[in-house]
Image (tube, grey):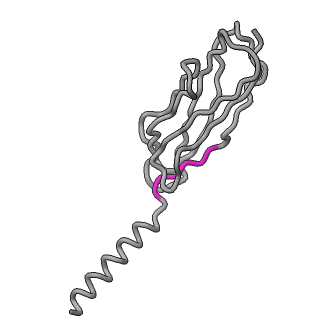
Amino acid sequence: MKKYLFILIACLVAVAAQAAGKGPQITLANTTYDMGTIHASKGNVKATYKFTNTGDEPLVIISVTNGGCGCTKPSYPLQPIAPGKTGQIVINFNPKGRRGELRREVKVKTNAKGTKRLSLKFTGVIIP
């Protein structure tokens, strides 16, 4: 009986130690970006979101949505980001054929512990 109790306690301690680890964590420098005034005839504009893996395991960016239209194309690191290292998510926006106020949002899915999809927003005003 003592042997089984000892094994049970050892297993619980191991699980608790593993749960105490931070795992991968993403810390963004900013989650919003103001593109200002955008001239539709000048071509693509970019919003850059810098981040750091503040966890203790590699961070993987699983996906970044396109914000609901073909005018928005995200690019992001496809390789895991080591603990303490930085990366960036770049959103390319094509304003051609659009005008007026711009408010878009993309969602970022990662393997970071305890986080759901992150929301990155960008705004501006498009002049034809």
Quadrant into which the C terminus falls: top right
Residue 118 is situated, as x and y percent measured from the top left of the image, at: 57, 43
Residue stretch in magenta: 23-28
Q: Quadrant of residue 126?
A: top right
**Residue at x-position 59% and y-position 22%:** 92
Q: Residue at x 46, y 57 (%)?
A: 23
From this viewpoint, which residue is outermost toward the top? 41
Residue 120 position, x and y percent, is 62, 37
Location of the N terminus by quadrant is: bottom left
Of residues 83 and 7, which is closer to you in this image? Answer: 7
Query: In this rendering, is residue 118 above or below 55?
Result: above
Q: Residue 83 or 73: which is nearer the viewer?
A: 73
56 to 92, vertically: above or below: below
Up-down relation of residue 71 to residue 113 (above or below): above
Give the residue displayed 69% in from the left and 37% down from the top: 32
Residue at image x 51%, y 56%?
114
Tell which residue pokes out farthest to the bottom in this image.
2
Q: How many marks?
A: 0
Q: In the rendering, at what x and y percent does residue 115 appear? A: 53, 52
Q: Is residue 103 left or right of residue 118?
A: right
Give the image location of residue 25, x and y in percent.
Answer: 52, 52
- Is 64 colored magenta in this rendering? no
Q: Quadrant of residue 71?
A: top right
Relative to 103, is 88 on the left or the right?
Answer: left
Looking at the image, residue 64 lies above or below residue 5: above
